[in-house]
Image (spheres, helix red, strand yellow):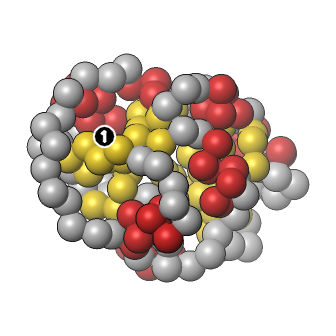
Amino acid sequence: MAKKEHVSETPATQLLRKHGAVFTEHPYAYEDHGGTAVSSRELGVEEHVVVKTLVMQDEQAKPLIVLMHGDKTVSTKNLARQIACKSVEPCKPEVAQRHSGYMIGGTSPFGTKKAMPVYVEASILALEKIYLNGGRRGYLIGITPQLLVDLLSAKPVNCAL
């Protein structure tokens, strides 16, 4: 398990604390382009319970967030169909950063600069605990998936590949 260290506040942790949400903090040694494989290894958990925060956009360039299992990818076709869009594609890194206020590799769905609709792979909501980015590189938070619905109004979708 990652050792407990003091981690400075992020917009994500500020939002969670403001709402009295229970979460655990998990700093780890960040590796460029390591993704969820590195964070799951560092935390000693399955990659399936590490959730990626992906900033995407529809055909009108309206941003949205997709939360996906670390060991899965998003079918943009299936996602677009389910959210009644013509198409969905990942935002360019600089665009994603502008929308979220977070650096790539440190994007949290909580405390984003711009309010965006949040979609969560439905099977994530069935997990007991998930780990997702806490708002900076090398820092995950552990939460119950229900917080995604309670605080972000995350809508379940089935778009995992």
Residue at image point 20% right, 47% down: 27
Residue at image point 33% right, 69% down: 10
Residue 14: image location, x then y, percent: 41, 70
Q: Total of numbered circles in the picture?
A: 1
Residue at image point 65% right, 26% down: 126
| Quarter location, residue 89 | bottom right
- 158, 123: nearer the viewer: 123
- 98, 127: nearer the viewer: 127
Residue at image point 24% right, 30% down: 43
Q: Is residue 14 visible?
A: yes
- 66, 56: nearer the viewer: 66
Residue 37: image location, x then y, percent: 29, 29
Q: Is residue 111 above or below residue 52?
A: below
- As drawn, which residue projects farthest toward the front? 20
* Image quadrant occupied by the N terminus: top left
- As drawn, which residue projects farthest toward the right? 84
Three-letter code for the amino acid on which mark 1 is drawn: Gly
Q: Is residue 107 visible?
A: no
* Image quadrant occupied by the C terminus: top right
Position of residue 61 in the picture relative to residue 143 (left or right): right
Circle 1 packing at 10 Å, graded few (<14), some (14-19), many (20+), is: some
Residue 60: image location, x then y, percent: 73, 73
Q: Is residue 153 above or below residue 51?
A: below
| Quarter location, residue 124 | top right
Position of residue 141 in the picture relative to residue 48 (left or right): left
Q: Is residue 140 above or below residue 38?
A: below
Residue 32: image location, x then y, percent: 18, 48
Position of residue 114 in the picture relative to residue 61 (left or right): left
Query: Mark 1 highlights which residue?
Result: 35
SS class, disc 1: helix
